[in-house]
Image (cartoon, rainbow, N blue to C red):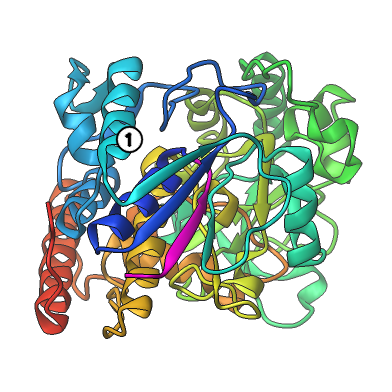
Amino acid sequence: MNVVVNVIGAGLAGCEAAWIIAENGINVRLFEMKPEKYSPAHKYSGFAELVCSNSLKAARLESSAGLLKYEMELLGSLTVPCAKENSVEAGGALAVDREKFSDAVTAKINSHPLIEVIGGEVAELPDGYTIIATGPLTSGAMAERIRELCGEGLSFYDAAAPIVTYESLDKEKVFFASRYDRGEADYVNCPMNKEEYLAFHSALLSAEKVQLHDFETHPFSVYEGCMPIEELASRGVDTMRFGPMKPVGITDAKTGRRPYAVVQLRRENREGTLFNLVGFQTNLKFGEQKRVFSMIPGLENAEFMRYGVMHRNTFINSPVLLNSDFSMREHPEIYFAGQITGVEGYMESAASGLLAGIALSRKIKGLEPLKLPLDTMTGALSAYISDPYNNGKFQPMGANMGILPDIGRRIKDKKERYGAYAERAVESLKNEMERIGYENNR
C-alpha cells in the first residue's frame, strides 16, 4: 500500500504498533532516538527495553495479567511470544532475560520488510497517520509538541492513591455518607477510634518507602497537594486528622458519634466496583501498603486492584482526548499508545500499541473496526482510558479484574471467580474476531 504510518518510539507500545501495522501490509516508519540519545532511565540500545523489573507479571489465565497476555496473543502480539521464548524461571510469573528479550524484539522489527527504522530524536510531529508512543519520560521537545496538541491535558507526575474492590470491604465496619450529609452519600467511610489511629500513624512512620530514581523529582516538592500520606504523618501525630482523615462533618452510622479519624473511599469507576482511598497517594512499597492500609477498619481483607504510586510519568488526559481505539477525538489521524495514554505496566503499554495498530490498520484498509467487548481485559482498559466519566480525576490504571463487568453471579472463591471472568473474556474476544473475520497473522 502507498500509505506510510509514522510510529514515534520503539518501546513496547511502539514495537507492537509498528509490527501489527506492517503485518497488515502497510509501510511503517519507526522513529527511535536510541542509541543517539537516551532517556535518564534507559541504558540498552535495543528496542522494547525493560527499565525496571524484568517480570511481566502472572502467567496463569485466571489472573488479570495472564488474561491480558492471552488476549494479546490472540490478536497477534509481537512481544508476548518474544517474552515466552526468552523467559527465565520466576514461579508463576512470566519473567524474561532483559537483553535477550530486547534483542528478539529488535531483530523482528529490523527484519520486517515493511518497517523502516529511523534513528534520532523527533522534535516535530510528522505529517500523516502517526502513533505517538514516546513513553513516560518523553523528551523535552516532543513533550512540548504533545502539550501543544493536547492543550492542558498533560501531566508529568503520577500521584495516585490505592484502589480496592467494593466487594472486599467489611460492610459491618464501613458506612456510606458524605461530609455534613451534603448531596448523595457517595463516600464509603472507615471510622477509627483513637487507639486504631495511633497504631496506624505509627505503622506509617516505620513503613519502608520506594527509593526514587535520580531523575525523579519528588512530586510533593512541586505540588503540596500531592503530598504522600506518610510524609503528612511525619509532620505530627494529628496532621492527618486535619487533612484527608479529618472526621469533621462525619457521624458514624453505627455509634451515632463522630469518629476520632476517618478514611474516606471514593468511587473509582462508573459501575461502583472500585473505590480509591481519598488523599492516600503514597510512596510506600507495595507490600508495605498492603500491610499498613489493611489496618484501616473495614479494609482488613481488602483486595487491592492498584497500589498507590508517586513517580515521574508523563501522561495525557485520555478521557477527554482519546477514543477507545486510542485515536484523538480532535485529530483522528493521530493515535497515542503506551504509558502516555494512562495504562500502567509493561504489558498494558504493549497492549495499547497493539490495539492502536490494529485500529489504524483496519481504518486504512477500509475494514470494519474491531469492537473489543467490555468484558475482555483489552476492552475494559480501552474503555477506562477513554471514558469521559473519569475526566477530572483520571489516573493511570493497569489490568485488574475489578475493571471488568460483574460476572452476574456470586462466586466466593477468588480463583474460581477470576477463572470465570477469564473464560467469559476469551469467549467474547474470539466471537468478536470471528464476527469481523479477524486473522491473527502470527
Q: Residue at x 74, y 35 (%)?
A: 229
Q: Does 414 sit left or right of 251 as displayed?
A: left
- Residue 70 visible in the shown view: yes
Q: Residue at x 55, y 74 (%)?
A: 333
Q: Position of residue 55 (x, y in %)?
A: 33, 25
Mark 1: secondary structure: helix
- Please tell me whether residue 4 belongs to the stretch shown in magenta: yes
Point out the stretch of residues depicted in magenta: 1-9
Q: Is residue 335 above or below residue 265?
A: below
Residue 379 location, quadrant: bottom left
Is 86 in front, or is 106? Answer: 106
Residue topped by disc 1: 110
Is 84 in front, or is 294? Answer: 84
Q: Position of residue 362 (x, y in %)?
A: 31, 75
- Please tell me whether residue 161 belongs to the stretch shown in magenta: no
Is 76 in front, or is 96? Answer: 76
Q: Is residue 367 above or below residue 336?
A: below
